[in-house]
Image: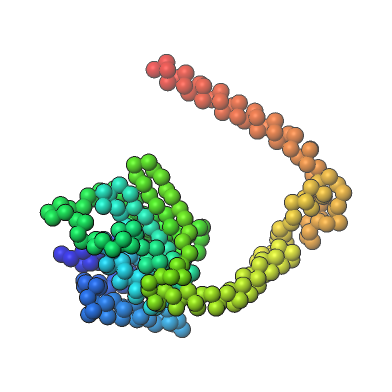
């Protein structure tokens, strides 16, 4: 069975509701590249939506194929994530590539390639590259985790995350695009990105202002049945010391307790609860030792 068919079979058994499509082709050939490009360009028509590909994950095992994915994504302005494991199988990396915004794969070529040595001549005849499924598993996990954060918009999406399994070292860095990149589509995307800066700044400013006004007016939710309000820390300090009851939010009619009175008994209770717990633990230990 081909790797693609095996993947489709496994994934369908995990989630039969997902529509999967597999292609088994060599993307480094002219025909293969065409089919690859078409598969990325095709849009899935949902109700009132024309979304295409959200992200491309590259899990290929050679430089040529990576350069082809890079070429396609640069031409189509397609965000993608690259992943790889070293020849000795003890380290790996994942990298987020946004055409024009971050370095593309050709912007910072690996040393071997930059020095003009053919990758194929480095491989010894009859000797396979090392393979550790654990390293592959960790790198694949990092790739999927980063993808999840990117697609569902939470947390920090790493632009580059390395993994050195011998030292459990995870280097991270950001790579800006190279203005002298050898990839013409990359240079085009860089120009567009610079040109769009004023529009990006305006969006960022509007977002900041919107966030600021939310904090000022407190309407986190439109239907705020219980008049719950977010207040500044400094206001809480003021009202608990009995100075500024006027600043109490609308709907809150009782004065808040003085901070000292509020904390004193709870601290004692908290401590005694800890002591109880400790004594209880000691009793359990004693019982165990007795056995
Ligand atoms: Zn580039």
Q: Residue furthest front?
A: 115
Point out residue 182 in the picture as x, y percentages from the top left corner. Answer: 38, 72
Is 11 placed left or right of 196 in the picture? left
Image-quadrant location for residue 200: bottom right
**Nearest the camera: 170 or 291?**
170
Q: Residue at x 38, y 58 (%)?
A: 94
Is 52 placed left or right of 155 in the picture? left
**Nearest the camera: 197 or 19?**
197
Residue 249 visible, this orientation? yes
Point out residue 226 in the picture as x, y percentages from the top left corner. Answer: 70, 61
Image-quadrant location for residue 180: bottom left
- Indicate the quadrant containing the C terminus: top left, top right, bottom left or bottom right: top left
- Indicate the quadrant containing the N terminus: top left, top right, bottom left or bottom right: bottom left
**Nearest the camera: 279 or 145?**
145
**Nearest the camera: 228 or 146?**
146
Q: Residue at x 42, y 15 (%)?
A: 290
20 to 289, vertically: above or below:
below
Residue 151 visible, this orientation? no
Q: Residue at x 63, y 75 (%)?
A: 202
Q: Residue furthest left?
A: 126
Point out residue 20 in the picture as x, y percentages from the top left corner. Answer: 29, 71
Is 92 placed left or right of 193 in the picture? left
Coloured how?
rainbow
Q: Residue furthest top?
A: 290
Q: Residue at x 81, y 56 (%)?
A: 248
Point out residue 190 in the picture as x, y percentages from the top left corner. Answer: 48, 74
Please give the count of numbered marks on the rendered protein: 0
């Amino acid at each position: 069975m081909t790797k693609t068919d095996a993947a489709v079979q496994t994934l369908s058994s995990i989630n039969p509701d997902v529509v999967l499509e597999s292609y088994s082709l060599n993307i480094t050939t002219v025909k293969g590249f065409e089919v690859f490009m078409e598969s990325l360009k095709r849009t899935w028509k949902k109700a009132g939506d024309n979304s295409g590909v959200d992200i491309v994950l590259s899990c290929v095992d050679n430089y040529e194929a990576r350069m082809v994915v890079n070429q396609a994504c640069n031409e189509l302005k397609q965000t993608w994530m690259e992943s790889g494991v070293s020849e000795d199988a003890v380290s790996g990396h994942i990298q987020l590539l946004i055409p024009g915004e971050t370095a593309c794969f050709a912007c910072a070529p690996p040393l071997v390639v930059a020095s003009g040595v053919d990758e194929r001549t480095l491989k010894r005849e009859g000797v396979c590259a090392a393979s550790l499924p654990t390293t592959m598993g960790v790198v694949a996990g990092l790739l999927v985790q980063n993808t999840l954060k990117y697609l569902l918009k939470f947390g920090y999406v790493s632009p580059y995350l390395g993994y050195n399994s011998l030292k459990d070292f995870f280097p991270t860095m950001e790579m800006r695009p190279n203005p002298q990149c050898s990839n013409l589509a990359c240079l085009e995307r860089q120009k567009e990105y610079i040109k769009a800066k004023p529009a990006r700044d305006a969006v960022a400013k509007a977002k900041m202002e919107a966030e600021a006004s939310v904090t000022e007016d407190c309407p986190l939710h439109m239907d705020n049945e219980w008049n719950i309000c977010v207040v500044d820390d400094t206001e809480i300090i003021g009202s608990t010391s009995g100075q500024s009851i006027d600043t109490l939010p609308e709907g809150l009619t009782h004065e808040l307790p003085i901070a000292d009175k509020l904390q004193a008994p709870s601290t004692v209770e908290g401590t005694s609860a800890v002591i109880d717990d400790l004594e209880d633990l000691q009793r359990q230990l004693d019982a165990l030792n007795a056995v």
